Amino acid sequence: MRVTALEISSHRFNKALRGYDKKEVDALKDLAAEALADAAREISELEGKLKESARQLAEHVERENMLKGTITTAHKMVEDLKNNAVKEAELIVAEARVRADEIIRDAHKRATALQDDIYRLKRQRIELETAMKAIIEYHSSTLFLEEEPEKPDDTPEITPLPPEEE
């Protein structure tokens, strides 16, 4: 049961023969009414503060939930970005390996072609050297034959020594 300050200050006590001093009772009633009024005001203020605190708490809980959602979304995005970066890196490495294999294959083809060219050129050089030696020998022998004086038939034929080959 709730008692208000007005009820205390307006309450009338029954008179008794040996009752209390009326001034003291009235003073106590006034003091009790004032204390009750102060308590009621304080309760009212505290209820207002409690409502404001509850409202702020609800806002903070709402913000906290929003932040948790944002953090969760950010974590998911980071994981997705990491996974995409890993996949992209793997793709780049795979493409680089394919390109490297192509470059190596082309280099081997080029090296083989160069070796074939070198072998062909060496063969041509040997053939040219052989042909030039044959031509030089032919012309050399032709020159020796032309330089020989005619001999009488009774002289034995002397054949010059061919030049030494190196």
Image (cartoon, grey):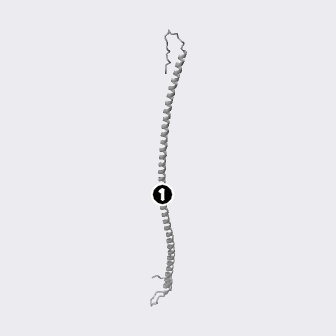
What element does badge 1 sit on? helix
Q: Which residue is mark 1?
A: 80
Residue drawn at (47%, 55%) of the image: 83
**Quick one: which residue is furthest to the front in this view?**
153
- In front of the other: 149 or 80: 149
- In front of the other: 137 or 72: 137
Residue drawn at (52%, 21%) of the image: 138
Q: Looking at the figure, which quarter contains the N terminus?
A: bottom left
- In front of the other: 128 or 91: 128
Amino acid, disc 1:
Asp
Q: Is residue 20 above or below residue 106?
A: below
Crowd class of label 1 (few under 14; some 14 to 19; many from 20; radius 10 Å): few
Residue 46, x across and y down, in percent? 50, 74
Residue 77, x across and y down, in percent? 49, 59
- In front of the other: 20 or 35: 35
**Quick one: which residue is furthest to the top in this view?**
154
Residue drawn at (49%, 30%) of the image: 123
Residue drawn at (48%, 55%) of the image: 84
Give the tally of numbered discs: 1
Residue 41, x across and y down, in percent? 51, 77
